Image (tube, grey):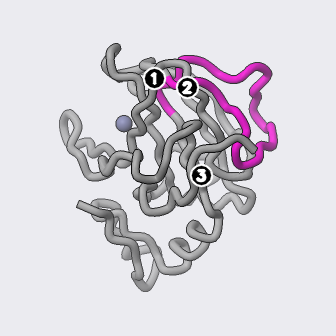
Amino acid sequence: MPAQVGPVADLALYDPAKGVVTLEDADRLRARVLVVPVLGKYPADVGATFSDGRSGARRHNAADIMAPRGTLVISADDGVIRRLGVSTLGGITIYATDPDDRFVYYYAHLDGYAPDLHVAQRVRRGDILGYVGTTGNAPPDVPHLHFQIMRLLDRNRLWDGVPIDPKPFLQLPGALR
Ligand SMILES: [Zn+2]
């Protein structure tokens, strides 16, 4: 099912289950003109997997982009690298924010980071962040980028924003800057 995108009156009416965002946030995110964050992939290659179920009560809340292991992962937007870390589910991950600190971009299952990638680094749309892999809970034979967008509510809780379906907002093919 394609995600439903706004409008709703205010933040309290967000419905993450449907990928609904406020009209203002939808406009702002659309204005970022995001690129598909995997080199050579097109908007049509982005999986409509936002609402898929996962184990327990979890929902996927992300788009999966299939690509061979080692394919370049590139920054979807301009912004700042906020957190680099390894987790059980996400494997090797990156959290970045847009220039207004309104949205968080989460990249997971990476094979590794680009050389010298570091927290507080400013990045531009199309900069190389890392490599597609299967770290975390990705099947070892299905390398892909798990890409999530969240509306940031608390700068100290990057992982705890309101999920937004990335698919309608990934407007340009993945290309280097
Ligand atoms: Zn995923």
Residue 155 location (% of width, % of height): 64, 52
Name which residue lies at 62% across and 48% down.
76
Quadrant assignment, res 25: bottom right
Q: Could you tell whether 116 is left or right of 15 in the image?
A: right
Q: Is residue 123 magenta?
A: yes
Image height check: is 161 above or below 110? below
Residue 34 figure quarter: bottom right
* Depth check, front residue: 75 or 62: 75
Determine whether the residue tagged by mark 2 lies in a helix, strand or loop: loop
Which residue position holds label 1? 68
Q: Residues within 10 Å of mark 3 (few under 14, many from 20)?
A: many
* Label 2 – label 3 distance at C-alpha: 15 Å
Crowding at mark 1 (Cα within 10 Å: few <14, some 14-19, many 20+): some
The magenta stretch is: 108-132
**Residue drawn at (43%, 70%), measured in percent from left and top?**
21
Verify whether residue 5 appears in magenta: no
Query: What secondary structure is found at the residue carrying circle 3?
Result: strand
The spot of residue 67 in percent (x, y) is: 44, 29
Picture quarter with the N terminus: bottom left
Q: x, y (%) of residue 38?
A: 55, 37
Q: Earlier in the sequence, mark 3 or mark 1?
A: 3
Q: What residue is shown at x 76% (from left), y 47% (from top)? A: 124
Amino acid type, mark 2: Thr
Residue 35 marker? 3
Say which residue appears at 43% left-offset and 62% top-offset.
168
Residue 160 in view here: no
Residue farthest toward the top in the current orientation of the protein: 140
Q: From the image, tell me which residue sits under label 2.
A: 71
